[in-house]
Amino acid sequence: MKNIVVLVSGGGTNLQALIDAQGRGEIKNGYISTVISSNPNAYALERAEKNGINTLIIRRRDYDSFDSYDSALTELLQSVGADVVVLAGFMTILGKKVIKAFENRIINIHPALIPSFCGEGYYGLKVHEEALKKGVKVTGATAHFVNEICDGGPIIIQKAVEVKNGDTPEILQKRVMEQAEWKILPKAVALFCEDKIKVIGNKTEIIE
Ligand code: GAR
């Protein structure tokens, strides 16, 4: 069984989707052992506690330098024995050390179809604001591995979602979460735990 550690910063609806998928038996070879938050007030922590999952806090501002924060996060993940790290709305950029220590073992959910509306500065509602500004008719979500390029790692699963007349960033965000994020993130984690994701260069192949 693979040890799944989930990093969060906010509401934690993607964490909830993982917990629910686990409850339905959809994550066959893994279990969520720990939730780590960058924000002590994140509602995601309550979701974890309600489900008997161990919680920890790590705040960027408690470290003098980005480098020492990067080392501390790496050590924390190693100390809890993480096999796979899931970024479920984690709003702090990861450093080189942690990315190297968990190469092709960190999965992020991004609320757009990468390579659209991604990269530095594209997070949360901002992604949907930009999609609406551009006038795209289709957006979606992407589950991908994390490498040193922001939102540039190998793509695991994508799912498209329709943009509708009158959408606001909030309405679109909710539709993307419901129709895409909450489905593809647990699926990507389940595939990883069953060793069904083969990474070839900067691409992946799903082993059926
Ligand atoms: C989600 O929409 C997630 O895709 C996004 O933040 C939200 C977190 O919601 N992540 C990013 O924008 C990362 N670049 P949640 O806390 O309810 O899961």
Image (tube, rainbow, N blue to C red):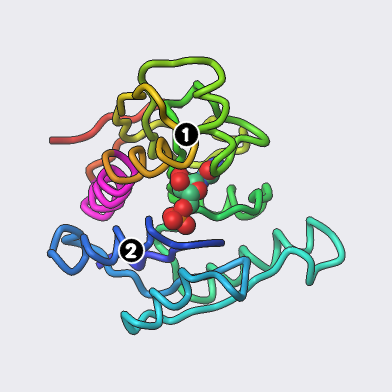
- In the picture shown, does residue 74 fall above or below 162? below
Judged by depth in the image, the label closer to the viewer, 1 or 2, is: 1
Q: Quadrant of residue 31?
A: bottom left
Check disc 1 and report the residue beneath it.
168
Q: Does the numbered disc 2 mark a residue whose Cβ is under 8 Å from ligand 1?
A: yes
- The image position of residue 8, as x and y in percent, is 51, 62
Please tell me which of labels 1 and 2 falls first in the chain. 2
Q: Which residues are magenta?
A: 180-195
State yes or no: residue 4 in magenta. Answer: no
| 31, 185: nearer the viewer | 185
Q: Which residue is drawn at the image coordinates 67% and 47% (left, top)?
A: 96
Q: Nearer the viewer, residue 142 or 13?
A: 13
Which amino acid lies under the numbered mark 1 shown in the image of this protein? Thr
Tell me which residue sits at (37%, 30%) in the image.
140
Specify the label residue 16 is tagged with: 2
Q: Is the magenta region chiefly helix, strand or loop? A: helix
Q: Is residue 195 left or right of residue 49?
A: left
Indicate whether 38 appears above or below 119: below
Image coords of residue 19 (percent x, y): 28, 66
Furthest toward the front, the residue is 166
The local secondary structure at tag 1 comes to: loop
- In the rendered view, would you say 204 is above or below 27? above
Q: Nearer the viewer, residue 195 or 36?
A: 36
Give me the residue at 63% from left, 65% from top: 73
- In the depicted view, which residue is nearer to us: 13 or 22? 13
Query: Could you say where residue 167 lies in the image, as x and y percent from the top left?
Result: 42, 30
Between the residue at mark 1 and the residue at mark 2, the CA separation in whole angstroms equals 24 Å
Amino acid identity at mark 2: Gln
Up/down of 55 relative to 195, above or below: below
Screen quadrant of the C terminus = top left
